[in-house]
Amino acid sequence: MKQKHRLALGSTIGLLIAILVGVILWLLGVSLTKLSDVYFMIGLALIVVGVVMQLSHAHLFAGFRRRRKKTYKEKAAGTPDPKMDTSNIAIKKNEPLRLSDWNRWLWIDGAVLIVIAVVITL
């Protein structure tokens, strides 16, 4: 089985388990508004995790300099700091964003849970 299909299957199974747990809790007497709130918050959390994962691949901090302490010999020699290669930084920053399978399914699952929460409250 391909990785994408395995991830989609796991995502679908996770959504079905969430719906099944919701139905069981509803049968046990939990109010629909509380169940809807939980679904909505879990959906928001999944979307936020997907956004954080996406931003971690965006090379936002490429080009920032880190100061390191010079050794005694470097201080005595008075050598200047090496210059940054701006072309490599520009190449990194201009790369298109990569949307991984994990991000895609986190966003889809989060959106589906939010839609379920809205439908439950109607």
Image (tube, rainbow, N blue to C red):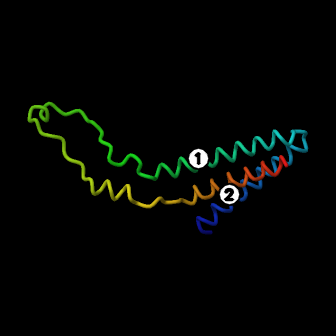
Q: Is residue 114 left or right of residue 100?
A: right
Q: Position of residue 52 (x, y in %)?
A: 53, 47
Q: Which mark is residue 49?
A: 1
Foreground residue among 15 and 122? 122
Dot 1, how many residues are within 10 Å of its Cα: few (below 14), some (14-19), or many (20+)?
some
**What kind of element bears circle 2?**
helix
Number of numbered tags placed on the structure image: 2
Mark 2 or 1: in front is: 1
**Label 2 – label 1 distance at C-alpha:** 15 Å
Q: Which residue is tagged 2?
A: 11
Q: Is residue 119 above or below residue 7?
A: above
Q: Is residue 90 above or below residue 83?
A: below
Q: Position of residue 30 (x, y in %)?
A: 87, 39
**What kind of element bears circle 1?**
helix
Q: Residue at x 23, y 32 (%)?
A: 69
User: In terms of image quadrants, where is residue 82?
Assistant: top left
Q: Is residue 20 left or right of residue 8?
A: right
User: In terms of image quadrants, where is residue 94?
Assistant: bottom left
Q: Residue at x 90, y 41 (%)?
A: 28
Q: Residue at x 54, y 59 (%)?
A: 100
Q: Residue at x 60, y 65 (%)?
A: 4
Foreground residue among 3 and 110? 110
Q: Position of residue 95 (x, y in %)?
A: 40, 60
Q: Is residue 88 above or below residue 35?
A: below
Q: As shown in the figure, which amino acid type bears the numbered disc 1?
A: Val
* Marks 2 and 1, the one that precedes in the sequence: 2
Residue found farthest to the left:
77
Q: Is residue 33 above or below residue 56?
A: above
Q: As shown in the figure, which amino acid type bears the numbered disc 2?
A: Ser
Q: Position of residue 101 (x, y in %)?
A: 57, 60
